[in-house]
Amino acid sequence: MVVEVRVRHGGTFNMGEAADQWKPFTSDQKVVAQRPGFDWDGRIAMIPGLPVRVHDAYIAGEGLLHASLFGLFSLANVHGTGEMAEGELMRFFAEATWYPTTLLPSQGVRWESIDDRSAHATLTEGSLSVTMLFTFNDSGLIETVRAEARGRMVSGEIVPTPWQGRFWNYSERDGMRVPLDGEVAWLLPTGAKPYWRGQITEIAYEFTQ
């Protein structure tokens, strides 16, 4: 079983609220499987010489999002339990495509089949319980993970919004097939609004002995 994962990403991040503004980013992420948690440190190049640092995390049942200019001037700082923690636990659950042993029933995930290509999966962590829709491609690999309502920050308020991660370009790593490319989007009434498109540049696992 996967105990810990370290991941490096590269890609683009959409900083535009109305019109798209894709900016390059790099990030480092550490994930622990039990108790579920992650710590994501991203660096988004707004313009040359003007980096925005984004710290996104789920630690000990609490969600955290902090963005700062040059790592000094705070642009956003939100943390807590409730909706914030639930949204970050959803992110952990969706990204389990990168640490797939976490999705096994033996690890506490409950699966309910819908048809040959989709199933609901439920993860419970302390007082939080999240259910997401997983769809699979012709090879039985995860294609999308969807939440019907994940908290989206809109003008400083958290608004429940449908949300989806999409994964492809699977490759074998340490005996597991994991996707190296992905896209994350809010599913708005006007259509999907992607805000993260990334590739894994490095991934390293620690396993139970």
Image (tube, rainbow, N blue to C red):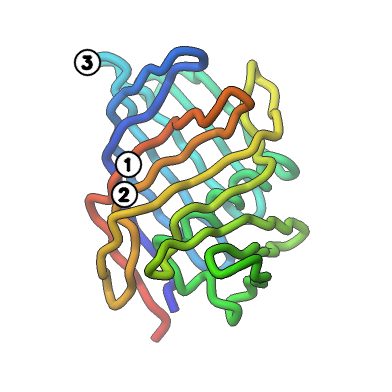
Q: Is residue 1 above or below residue 90?
A: below
- Residue at the far bottom in the pictured view: 209
Tell me if I can see residue 4 in this picture.
no
Q: Secondary structure at mark 1?
A: strand
Label 1 and label 3: CA atoms lie apart by 20 Å
Q: Amino acid at mark 1?
A: Gly
Q: Secondary structure at mark 3?
A: loop
Residue to which mark 3 is pinned: 48
> Residue drawn 28% across and 28% down?
24
How packed mark 2 is, by other alpha carbons closer than 10 Å (few <14, some 14-19, many 20 or more), is: some
Residue nearest the observer in this picture, 134 or 129: 134
Label 2 and label 1: CA atoms lie apart by 6 Å
In the rendered image, which quarter is residue 97 located in? bottom left
Q: Amino acid at mark 2?
A: Asp
Of labels 1 and 3, earlier in sequence is: 3
Residue 8: x and y, percent? Answer: 29, 49
Residue to which mark 2 is pinned: 181
Residue 183: x and y, percent? Answer: 40, 41
Residue to which mark 1 is pinned: 198
Tell me if I can see residue 126 in this picture.
yes
> Residue drawn 29% across and 23% down?
45
Q: Is residue 33 above or below residue 24?
A: below
Marks 2 and 1 in Cβ contact (< 8 Å): yes
Q: Secondary structure at mark 2?
A: strand
Q: Amino acid at mark 3?
A: Pro
Of labels 2 and 1, earlier in sequence is: 2
Q: Is residue 197 above or below residue 173?
A: above
Q: How many numbered dots are placed on residues in this image?
A: 3
How packed mark 3 is, by other alpha carbons closer than 10 Å (few <14, some 14-19, many 20 or more), is: few
> Residue drawn 26% across and 64% down?
171
